Image (tube, rainbow, N blue to C red):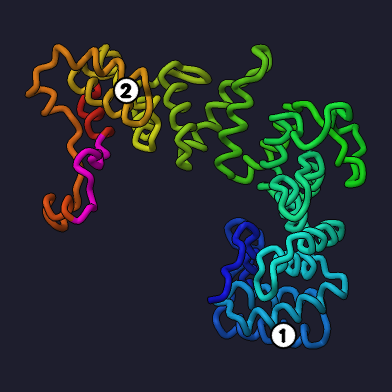
Amino acid sequence: MPKQPDERFPIPQPQAFTEPVLDLLGGVARPRPLSGEEAIRRLNEMEARARAGDPESQAELARRLLTEAPNARKNRRALILLRHAAAAGSATGLHLLALLHLRGQGLSQDLTKGVELLESAAYRGSKAAQADLAHALLDGIGTCVNTAKALYWLRLAAAQGDEQSALEAARILRDGESPSVHSENKQTLNESTALSPQNTHQAIFNTDHRQAEKYFTEAAKAGIPEAQYELAELLRRREVSERDPAAARKLMREAAFSGIVDAQLRNGVANWSGIGGKVDQREAVRWLCRAAEGGSAKAAAMLAGFLMTGNGLAYSPARAWALFMRAAKMGNENAAATAKILERPLPLQEKRHCLFRPRYSAEGSLREKLKGGLLQPNAPQWDVSICAVVRSMQMQ
């Protein structure tokens, strides 16, 4: 059985064949996907240019062969095309050929050769190669770990509009020192420092939150949820005189809508306390419910606290106990201790009524599922009903 390719370096998907169409409402040209016949005609034209020796057409044709139902025959043809394109100096051809060496797709895996080809493509200006080279340097794949040099390439890729590279560069600048170099060679990376691949391998840098904020902002504007969340955290943790809680709250809300659990928790806290805007307890409870259902033990414990005190939610010690139990199962030790205290005076019937019921699918009986090992009797699948329970206790 042939060895599966190494998926740490995926082949970038080819762009669909499109043509510009004037948007009458916006007054700008927008791309429109071509129909089947038109797309086939474009593909035939690409093949003709590739046979004529055009290196970019050879590289793009190879990309389609490698990503659209690849097999051994397509891999062999793609390898030939990429070798021709790389020999002609195509940055895309060098990048894709490097990925084949790194993945072991169509040839034997050679990480060192793959990194060498990545570097050649990166020097020729391929932002995708620059980003992949940075990841190889960060993870020590085919080369030594070198965070400072990785930062150099990430910055170059970010300057060409690669938002994911901007996010990675921002994280490195926020977190500070590179672990891959020696302290006696320490120097600070900032905008005034002239960097090159030859001197960055000796660089150690301090945290640079200003530059980190710049790159986080670029990635956040592109709609990357992780960048929105981390930029909001950076704005929230600034020096007191420079904090921007309103901007942080807005970004945190955008990240929360994208499903980031920590952002949902932060958004709930901001709405509850009024940080960066008005107090909205109903909105706070809604976001805390989402975070709790996403696995946030802290959010579940906060909701349980509201039920225990009657602050924002109707007073219900039994439901508070049940929710503290849920938070304890998520790993919150304080919730476990509080649940024990609340449990003592509660009647057994009330606890049975309020405890979240195990959830089983409609197919098959409980006995059959236990017998088949699909469910463990001591580890029930808790019914995801936090929102339903809390909503019923919300004050009007």
Residue sitting at 76 percent across and 62 percent down?
Answer: 114
Q: Which x, y percent locates residue 239?
A: 67, 15
Q: What segment carries the magenta color?
A: 372-385
Q: Residues within 10 Å of mark 1 (few under 14, many from 20)?
A: some
Residue type pointed to by label 2: Leu
Q: How far separated are the C-alphas under marks 1 and 2?
A: 61 Å
Query: Which quarter of the figure is the C terminus placed in?
Result: top left
Q: Which x, y percent locates residue 301?
A: 34, 22
Local SS, label 1: helix
Q: Which x, y percent locates residue 182?
A: 83, 31
Residue sitting at 83 percent across and 70 percent down?
Answer: 90
Q: In this view, does 193 lie to the left or right of 81?
A: right
Which residue lies under the disc numbered 2?
Answer: 303
Q: Quadrant of residue 293?
A: top left
Q: 362 or 140: nearer the eye?
A: 140
Any part of residue 322 in sight: yes
Is 382 magenta? The answer is yes
Q: In this view, does 380 lie to the left or right of 36?
A: left
Q: How crowded is mark 2: few (under 14 residues within 10 Å), some or many (20 or more)?
A: many
Residue type pointed to by label 1: Glu
Q: In which quarter of the image is residue 12?
A: bottom right
Is 374 magenta? The answer is yes
Q: Which x, y percent locates residue 128?
A: 73, 57
Residue sitting at 47 percent across and 26 percent down?
Answer: 266
Local SS, label 2: helix
Against 2, residue 181 (above or below) is: above
Mark drawn on residue 47: 1
